[in-house]
Amino acid sequence: RGKRETRAAARVEKERMILLTQNLLVSPMAGASEGVSLGIEATEVESKEREYDADFLKKMLERIDWPSFVTAAKTLEVGDGIPATRDGLDEGDDAMMRKVHHALLEVNVVSGNLICTETGRKFPISLGIPNMLLNQDEL
């Protein structure tokens, strides 16, 4: 690869770890309950504007774990204006929905960790890609 291609690939990789991805992943740890969510901590965060699509957002909101999303958004300091409960979300409030869109789809964790909320095991995020591989003794 040339230098230009390498830089472009790195830029694309840095944009992969958004809160939607974090929310849909579950802990692979053998000692964790099935479907347990992952926490997040970030050492580098970037924001990348994405086109707002209300229909897509509403469909994704049906799939996410709301409490985990709110916790992650607050951890990354993008949770202002996002209600603590799903019932508090007014899908007709464009300003509120755009805040949710921003937190869920535009905030990129470039580096940090995903954390199993039951075992505390950390999975590093580097260049926006989480490494979810387990060590031999964790299988």
Image: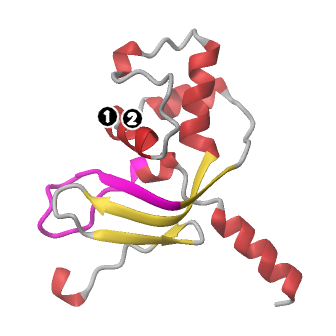
Q: Main secondary structure of the magenta part?
A: loop
Describe residue 117's horizontal placement relative to residue 68 as left or right: left
Q: Which residues are magenta?
A: 23-43
Within 10 Å of disc 2 (Cα), the crowding (few <14, some 14-19, many 20+) is: many
Whether residue 139 is visible, yes or no, is: no
Residue behind mark 2? 70
Whether residue 39 is visible, yes or no, is: yes
The residue located at (71%, 66%) in the rendering is: 12
Position of residue 121 measured from the top left corner of the image (x, y, whole percent): 24, 69
The residue located at (31%, 34%) in the rendering is: 67
**C-alpha gap between disc 1 and disc 2:** 5 Å
- How many numbered marks, from 0 up? 2
Q: Amino acid at mark 1?
A: Pro
Q: Amino acid at mark 2?
A: Val
Return the residue nearer the eye: 89 or 71: 71
Q: Does the magenta portion include 53?
A: no
Within 10 Å of disc 1 (Cα), the crowding (few <14, some 14-19, many 20+) is: some
Quarter of the image with the C terminus in it: bottom left
Query: Which image quadrant is residue 87 in?
Result: top left
Secondary structure category for the residue under label 1: helix
Position of residue 70 measured from the top left corner of the image (x, y, whole percent): 39, 35
Q: Are marks 1 and 2 in contact (CB under 8 Å)?
A: yes
Q: Does the magenta portion include 25?
A: yes
Quarter of the image with the N terminus in it: bottom right
Residue behind mark 1? 67
Return the residue nearer the eye: 75 or 38: 75
Secondary structure category for the residue under label 2: helix
